[in-house]
Amino acid sequence: MSNGAESSLDRTALASCGRLVIKVGSSSLTREDGHLDVMHIAILVDAIGAARARGQEVALVSSGAIAAGLLPLGLTHRPYDLPTQQAAAAVGQGQLLELYTALFRRFGLSAAQVLLTTADLEYQERYHNARATMDRLLELGVVPIVNENDTVATQELRFGDNDRLAALTSHLVHADALLLVSDVDALYTAHPETPGARRIGVVRSADDVAGIDISRRGSEVGTGGMVTKLEAARIATGAGIAVGLTDLEHLPRLLTGEDVGTFFVPTGKRRPARLLWLAHISDPDGALVLDAGAVRAVTERKASLLPAGITAVRGSFDTGDPVDLVDERGKVVARGLVTYASADLKSMIGHHTWDLAASYGERFQRAAVHRDSLVVLR
Ligand SMILES: Nc1ncnc2c1ncn2[C@@H]1O[C@H](COP(=O)(O)OP(=O)(O)O)[C@@H](O)[C@H]1O
Ligand SMILES: N[C@@H](CCC(=O)OP(=O)(O)O)C(=O)O
């Protein structure tokens, strides 16, 4: 982690990279009284218009539908129950799009509405359809405006917050960078109101953010706080996508590569969509407890998990279901698609492959989780 001149070397790529995803949170789009903040939205649209003029393709992930729907429905605060949130989003989303459409027209740009749910990224066919549409929109010079499909998303279907949706969208469209726009200009060493809190210019690895206090929530209308922003940054950088974090005021300067905000350096490389789903969307149906040797084999040698390294089976699952791989203290170290049902696996744990083949037949020689269907999570 560092502040100052050194960091501007990395971030200069933001001015020239081909495809960007920009995510803006509710707190940046609305005024305190719940109205959409037209001035703020105009600043955002200006920054995107300038990026388009530089030849960059931009997809916008915009929150604000629920907040925009409060006033028309006579609500004085964000509702807690899901149906009212969904109703507010249905009213507000239209207003949001109307405004974006008018503002982008000033740059000769068209805006498109794209509403997604987790299921759209979970099923291969839908993922490819969403990808093809987004690609075509970007090639046509349109600005896709993505939000969660709040009308149909139920509690367990919800992305949970738009930061994560933005990270998954940046993977979907093969973006070079993801910019998270919030009501704070950067990540700080503690909550920005804490005396002595300092801006973090660059984050190079998870270790750089390990000791930072991000627990305090921000605005009334924002949902995730800094926790979901760092989670989004982890998902994107782990898939080879650079991430920038700043507020609307500093966005134009971040977009031209200046040393403002926080820049997260990509740490991993692009993963197949199937593994992205496994790591960040799937809901595990059970857990396999691994002995220390198996933890090392899976996490360090990237080996398949054999029944011999499993000490316990938790939950009830079928062949092909996602399961967590946990160490003996219960810490999740990986997630994978299991190749045996829980009932079979319980009688196989601790047995070596050759014993299993002799007792049950050759079909039982296979690994419990193949390395191609496994993602390390720590
Ligand atoms: N270490 C930190 N650095 C910066 N901001 C922090 C930190 N810890 C907590 N926060 C809070 O996170 C808020 C941003 O999250 P949130 O209000 O959910 O924004 P958004 O609506 O943009 O998603 C900031 O306004 C700030 O109050
Ligand atoms: N789909 C919701 C998103 C809510 C949300 O996650 O907001 P934020 O924490 O500001 O990104 C809406 O448009 O209001």
Image: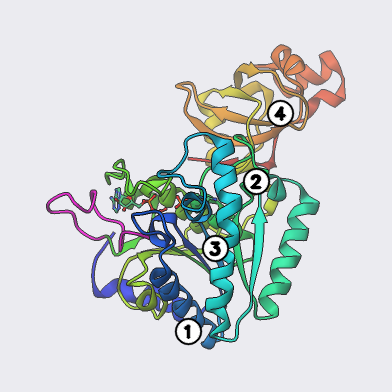
Residue holding disc 1:
50
Q: Position of residue 332 (x, y in %)?
A: 51, 31
Query: What is the total number of numbered labels drawn onto the structure image?
Result: 4
Going from N to C along the chain, the mark reached first, 2 or 4, is: 2
Residue at coordinates 39% horizontally, 61% vertically from top-left? 28
Viewer-side label of 1, 4: 1
Q: Residue furthest left?
A: 195
> Can you tell me whether the CB of the residue at mark 3 lies under 8 Å from the nearest atom of ligand 2?
yes
Please check the rendered image and state whether residue 171 is part of the magenta-colored stretch, yes or no.
no
Q: Position of residue 53 (x, y in %)?
A: 53, 87
Considering the numbered disc 3 on the image, is that residue within a helix, a strand or a loop? Answer: helix
**Which sits in the foreground, 49 or 273?**
49
Per the rendered image, the range of residues in magenta is 181-199
Q: Quadrant of residue 339?
A: top right
The amino acid on which the numbered mark 1 sits, given as a three-letter code, is: Ala
The amino acid on which the numbered mark 4 sits, given as a three-letter code, is: Ala
Residue holding disc 3:
96
Distance (Cα) linking label 3 and label 1? 21 Å
Crowding around mark 3 (Cα neighbors within 10 Å: few <14, some 14 to 19, many 20+) is many
Distance (Cα) linking label 3 and label 4? 48 Å
Going from N to C along the chain, the mark reached first, 3 or 4, is: 3
Q: Is residue 154 above or below residue 329?
A: below
Going from N to C along the chain, the mark reached first, 3 or 2, is: 3
Which label belongs to residue 151? 2
Please check the rendered image and state whether residue 192 is part of the magenta-colored stretch, yes or no.
yes
